[in-house]
Image: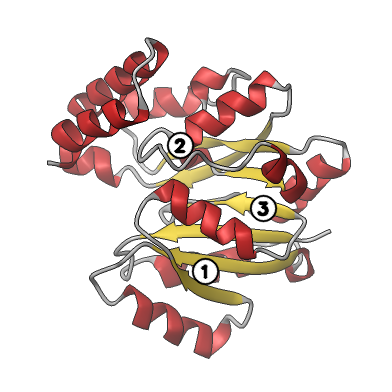
Amino acid sequence: MKISIVIPILNEAATICKLLSYLFQNSYSQENLEEIIVVDGGSEDNSLEVILQCIKENNPKVSLISSPKGRAIQLNSGAKVAKGRVLYFLHADSYPPKHYDHFILNEVKKGNNAGCFRMKFDSNHPWLRFLGWLTQFESKRCRGGDQSQFITKDLFDEVNGYDESYIVYEDNDLVDRLFAINQFVIIPQYVITSARKYREIGVWRLQYHFLNIHMRRWMGASSEDLYRYYKEKVVS
């Protein structure tokens, strides 16, 4: 039983090789890793050249594929070509705990076929520390893609993967569906994820918009409505 790590990227030339090296250096055993699949969504920097050079130098288990832009589409594209029995979806700016592969495979062996880690931001801002503290609780309201997600390939196919109609909120949508069938566990180890978007936009401003997106979703907003709001308030 091996893990296929799927990492969607868009303009991550500055950091992607650091993450790839980290994943190999901090695995319990590289034998647990089937592969690392980097899925590019149309980067306009030199991400592709950087990754190819990184593969050539020291990462033979890494492969690079392309797909249309959109995290859900990119994640599904990676899952389709994955050879491992366990999929591990990871953001390009998130670093899982040491021996992450051991923790994931232990849960699968215990019959827990999907789940995530707890999460901390690389920031001492009180609110971001509070958000990290919340991730210890077994509630779907405390989940997010920054925590990374593992799932067996069989279960991923059974629930039809990520809903590609979601440009944002795709991680939460999958978690909602997994919670509905009682197939989700939180591993008590921490992913460290970048707070770069909070630093760029402002902690309180970005958190307000994220809460607004969650509230709109709970009140029945469509995936198109959520993306329209995100593009207008967060991206622009």
Q: Is 177 on the left-hand or right-hand side of 157?
A: left
Whole-angstrom CA distance, mark 2 to mark 1, is 24 Å
| Residue 113 picture quarter | top right
Which quadrant: the N terminus? bottom right
Q: Residue furthest bottom?
A: 56
* Residue projecting furthest to the top: 219
**Which quadrant of the rendered structure holds the C terminus?**
top left
For the point 37% across and 47% down, the residue is: 194
Dot 3 corresponds to which residue?
87
Disc 3 on helix, strand or loop? Answer: strand
Can you tell which mark lies on residue 20?
A: 1
Q: Nearer the viewer, residue 222 or 201?
A: 222
* Total marks in image: 3
Q: Where is residue 42 shown, x and y percent of the image?
A: 31, 66
- Give the foreground label among 2 and 1: 2
Cα distance, mark 3 to mark 1? 16 Å
Q: Which residue is mark 2?
A: 170
The reply to whether discs 3 and 1 touch (Cβ–Cβ < 8 Å) is no
> Residue 174's x, y, as percent?
56, 33
The 10 Å Cα crowd at callout 3, few under 14, some 14 to 19, many 20 or more, is many
Q: Amino acid at mark 2?
A: Glu
